[in-house]
Image (cartoon, grey):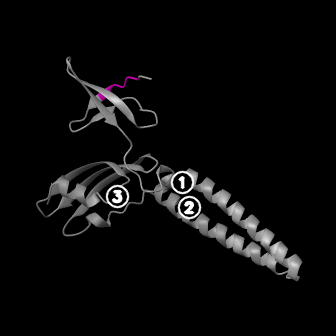
Amino acid sequence: MAQRFQMIDRGSYFESVDEIPEPHAFNAHVRAGESETRIVRFEEHEHHEHGASHRDNNMRAAVVHVMADAAVSVLVIVGLLLARAFGWLWMDPVADLIGAFVIASWSYGLIRNTGAILLDMTPDKILKADGDHVKDLHLWRLGPGHLGAILCVSTTKQRNSAFYHSKLAGFSSLSHVTIEVETA
């Protein structure tokens, strides 16, 4: 299926005027001028070994819910069987307490990760060293496992944006980064 998207030249990259639907893997016929057309293959960026769903908190919440239900059900069955076989009536409440702890532990991890997203928490300590300071930072989610960032760094050293791109290269979820450097 062929689709057309109008692009805007942003200097070092092109931006689509229209939203490009998922999946973000396609062949683009890029026309520069009237006569020159090139075919360019676009694909999703590499993800961690767990794939994009690992970073999708909606999918993670569903998996945690199903796993918690299964774990608690198994614990309750084991508790009831032990209570019946050995007369250990205390096993049922113990299984319930263990199940509550498992659910609370998984829920805490999910709340911590989604809270960090909602509060726009970013790991910026890597740029606050050796006379550098992040003056302005804009970070937004492009999709599951993909972040875009625009930042302005003030530095006392003679450094260019490539230096800071290399510092941020360890954050594989940063799919598109624009850096402005001001030398103080």
Q: Main secondary structure of the magenta part?
A: loop
Name the amino acid type tagged 3.
Answer: Phe
Q: Earlier in the sequence, mark 1 or mark 2?
A: 1
CA gap between label 2 and label 3 equals 20 Å
Residue 160: x and y in percent read 15, 55
State the mark number for residue 57: 1
Task: Please give the residue where the numbered disc 2 appears in the rendered image.
Answer: 110
For this orientation, the residue located farthest to the top is 34
Q: In screen coordinates, is 54 left or right of 2? A: right
Instruction: Inspect the magenta stretch and tell me whether residue 12 lies in it.
Output: no
Residue at coordinates 79% horizontally, 76% vertically from top-left? 93
Residue 99: x and y in percent read 71, 70
Q: Nearer the viewer, mark 2 or mark 3?
A: 3
Task: Please give the residue where the numbered disc 3 appears in the rendered image.
Answer: 171
Residue at coordinates 84% horizontally, 73% vertically from top-left? 81
Magenta stretch?
3-7
